[in-house]
Image (cartoon, grey):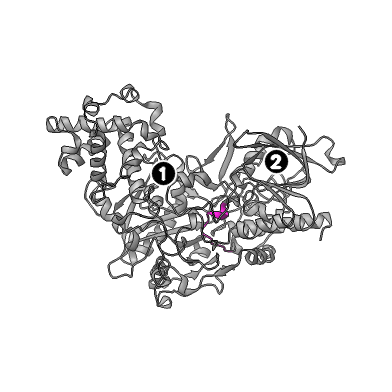
Amino acid sequence: MSQVISRRAALRSLGLLALGATVGCTPLRVVLDKHPRALDDDGTLEDRVLRAFLATVIPGSDAAAPDAIRVFHDRAYPFAKYARFFAGDLCRRAARRSGGATFDQLSPADRTAVVQEGLAADGTTRKLYGGAIYLIQIATYASIYDDRGGCPLIDFDGGYHFRPRTENTYPDPDSFLASALTASGNHA
Amino acid sequence: MDAIRTDVLVIGSGFGAAAPALRLAQAGLSVVMVEKGPHIDHLRDFRQTQDPQYLRQYLHGLAGDHLSLTYAEGLGGGSGFYEMVSLRAPSLAFRQTDARGRRLWPAELERGTLDPYYDRAEAMLRVEQIAPHDVPKSGLVFSLLMKNLGYSCDRARYAVRNCMGSGFCVSGCIYGAKQSLHVNYLPQAVAAGARIECDLEAQALRPLPGARALPYRYEVRCRRRSGARDVVVFQAKIVILGGGTIGTAALLLRSRPDLPRLSSEVGKHIAFNGSVKVAALLPEHFPAGDMFAGRSHPGMISYQFLESHGISISAGKAMPLMVVSAARLRLDGDGREPAWWGQANVDLMRQMRHRMIALVSFGLTPPGGTITLGADGHPALSLAPTRELERYVETTHGILQDILVRNGCRMIDTEWVKKSGVPADAGLHFATAHQVGSCRMADDRRSGVVNAAGEVFGYPGLYVSDGAAIPSSLAVNTSLTILANAERIADGIKERLGLP
């Protein structure tokens, strides 16, 4: 069924924007953060993997920007507790697929396949991957760490930058207007 | 602990609370207004942002299986965050009946009864019909869709002055253009002597012993929500509940042990303006819209299907956050996988600003929602899905889709997601900020909680003046009707007290 987005419907989703729901059914390996040793051995691997994840979910976004993956570690969102485990899971699946490569070393097509695999895995992993996509889409498209900058990828210019009224409307509004049922805008 | 005594205690500071606070202060009564949420200086505190952490300071939700409600907490209530749409409810909204043919509104209340109060509310909010040259592109494109099919479409009415079209109405207007309650009722009430206390939550209400013989009839226990969380107790001759459909019902439900004559209808009959939404991409030959430019509401409303189907239709504008936090989008017929993320999703999002059109309908759905208090004392929400509601959604969805498809638009499939980002269960679900009616006006206490004057049955001097008192869906935005009704209730109180 086709449905869409109202501002109201959307605002109702703002309560958590997070993975709170996963906590109650989180496998022990997540609670214990059983991530691959490579993440400990290579201090930049987690960052590279999460940036590669962003590039996979939102191709064309500026994955190198300083705040590009900040949302994954933002303690305002419960996902921060799972970010390292998530990066590790991406690498585990990447390694299985490629014979040892880390997620960021895969081709775009293989990275996409890894994410799809995560989304098709057990319920908790599905929530983890779905939540990660959800968060990074919100952070990137809505530019939540840069009120003024916006998201050039979708022509969202962030906070208001002055534009003349002529950019908000068309110069010949009457040619668009349908017949009105009321004189004032209020129905009788 | 010493109680603070006042003639009038107003609980809440939104549309339903501000009018009684102002009018009764102007009449010379001592008035204290308590607001659960934070103080808001609209020129200092609002931000043009999509940051969820900012929005969560003020906007909250209550979700049930088939209904989700959004509401604001903060000085001015929803007035700081609404889209400024200020429309009178159509006459047929007042004539709705329940399944047994009984009027939902009290017999004495018609549109004509409220019209003088609509006049006053419109004057206070400086409501005007939008001029053609101010209608945002998305609104003009919507009007053109209707025009192409021979349908009508009207320019809507807004509470705004000198709007510059920044598009951030729903995160709070930083320019003071929106005529929220921060620029009219609330400062005027303070000037008239009212005292406003924010960050103070009313937790329980009880009649004072021997209240019929004493001037101070009710005691309200409040608690600070931050800092030392100290308790503040008020005693008042008149208590006006204006904390909104959820807040007012929750307070009365919590206070029920001390209010034995309270109607059993508290928390029931919540109406929700059953909104249905569809989206599509405009055909190539069509002029472009603009989701991000111009006021948040796109300026046009169609009453074409009001008489026949009980719905009004508007276009919907949405910021990126509103879209991606609510739904997974797929362009109809785009076979690429993955669809809701990856390249296919980016390609769709790139068209969001100029080529996406969303239609939103509000309808006269029956007041079927219910709020109860859970074991933890927090409100819980429910709506029984009915075949009638399912038919309403199917029919309305068909009307909206027909408008788009007959104009050559390409539909967008939307899979709603929960707050956690996982897909919501399929089936009937309404989401709104237009909830009314949890303590509805009625002709008797078997049918409602307050009488037509807004006074709680069995409790003289205790009033409900907010959306909770409104008995039905309105098929248009609810704020102006809530305000007009609150003005009417305030006039009634003054009249009964013999005040000028």
Q: Can you give x and y, in whole percent of width and height, for residue B35 in the image?
A: 64, 45
Instruction: Please say if A89 is above or below A32.
Output: below
Q: Are marks 1 and 2 in contact (CB under 8 Å)?
A: no
Residue denoted by label 1: B427
Please give the chain letter of the residue carrying mark 2: B
Q: Which residue is mark 2?
A: B263
Which badge, 1 or 2, is on the more N-terminal residue? Answer: 2
Same chain, marks 1 and 2?
yes
Give the residue at x 40% y 55%.
Answer: B319
Q: Residues within 10 Å of mark 1 (few under 14, many from 20)?
A: few
* Chain bearing mark 1: B
Amino acid type shown at disc 2: Ser
| Residue A41 sits above or below residue B202 on the image | above
Q: Quadrant of the C terminus of chain B?
A: bottom right
Q: Which residues are magenta?
A: B78-87
In the rendering, which numbered label is found on residue B303? none
Q: Main secondary structure of the magenta part?
A: loop
Seen in the image, is B469 located left or right of residue B330? right
